[in-house]
């Protein structure tokens, strides 16, 4: 049985849905407050581009965005990565969401890992079409 928490499923254009997810099992109030704090105070991933981070937990939540040019509102996945030292970083890239989802599918739930996974956050493409991905640091 998985020890993660699927919080909600939200329809997202065009054909997928984004699940609110956390690998942290928040069974008591202190853990719930720590989870809230990690997400609320997370820094943007741009601050750690190209630097290794030791991934311990993942939070994914659907977030509403409005395109500044077209005015179209869409739901995109906001991914928060929580490191072994308690730092948290966030990004809203669909490729980042895809890569994290793939990592969880292959490596399993973070609660089953023998140790944190060392990753590097990479920005690819050119503005305004740049996006975030993850690479193994090893």
Image: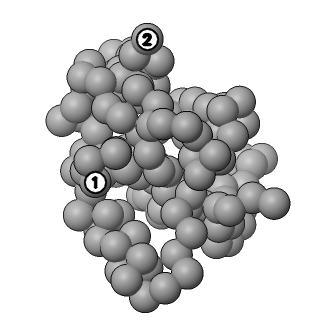
Location of residue 82 in the rendering, given as x and y in whole percent from the top left corner: 37, 50
Q: Residues within 10 Å of mark 1 (few under 14, many from 20)?
A: few
Report the colour scheme. Answer: one colour
Q: Where does the C terminus fall, quadrant-wise?
A: top left
Q: Residues within 10 Å of mark 2 (few under 14, many from 20)?
A: few
- 108 or 15: nearer the eye? 108
Residue 72 visible? The answer is no
Residue lying at the far top of the rendered structure: 138
Location of residue 13 in the rendering, given as x and y in whole percent from the top left corner: 68, 51
> Quick one: SS at disc 1?
loop
Location of residue 41 in the rendering, given as x and y in whole percent from the top left corner: 23, 64
Location of residue 104 in the rendering, given as x and y in whole percent from the top left corner: 65, 39
Give the CA separation, mark 1 to mark 2. Answer: 21 Å
* Residue holding disc 2: 138
Where 103 falls versus 69 (above or below)?
Answer: above
Q: Earlier in the sequence, mark 1 or mark 2?
A: 1
Residue 27 visible? The answer is yes
User: Residue 129 sits in which quadrant?
Assistant: top left
The residue located at (40%, 70%) in the rendering is: 35
Q: Is residue 44 left or right of residue 25?
A: left
Q: Is residue 61 left or right of residue 131?
A: right
The residue located at (49%, 56%) in the rendering is: 59
The residue located at (36%, 35%) in the rendering is: 54
Q: Where does the N terminus fall, quadrant-wise?
A: bottom right
Residue 86: mark:
1
Where 93 falls versus 110 (above or below)?
Answer: above
The residue located at (66%, 56%) in the rendering is: 18
Q: Is residue 8 left or right of residue 99?
A: right
- 75 or 116: nearer the eye? 116
């Amino acid at each position: 049985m998985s020890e993660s928490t699927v919080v909600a499923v939200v329809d997202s254009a065009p054909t997928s849905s984004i699940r609110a997810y956390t690998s942290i099992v928040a069974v008591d109030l202190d853990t719930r407050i720590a989870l809230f704090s990690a997400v609320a105070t997370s820094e943007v991933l741009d601050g750690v581009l190209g630097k290794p981070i030791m991934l311990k937990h993942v939070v994914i939540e659907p977030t509403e965005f409005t395109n500044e040019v077209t005015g179209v509102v869409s739901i995109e996945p906001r991914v928060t990565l929580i490191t072994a030292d308690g730092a948290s970083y966030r990004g809203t890239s669909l490729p980042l969401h895809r890569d994290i989802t793939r990592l969880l599918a292959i490596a399993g739930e973070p609660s089953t890992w023998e140790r944190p996974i060392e990753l590097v956050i990479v920005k690819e493409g050119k503005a305004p079409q740049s996006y975030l991905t993850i690479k193994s640091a090893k």
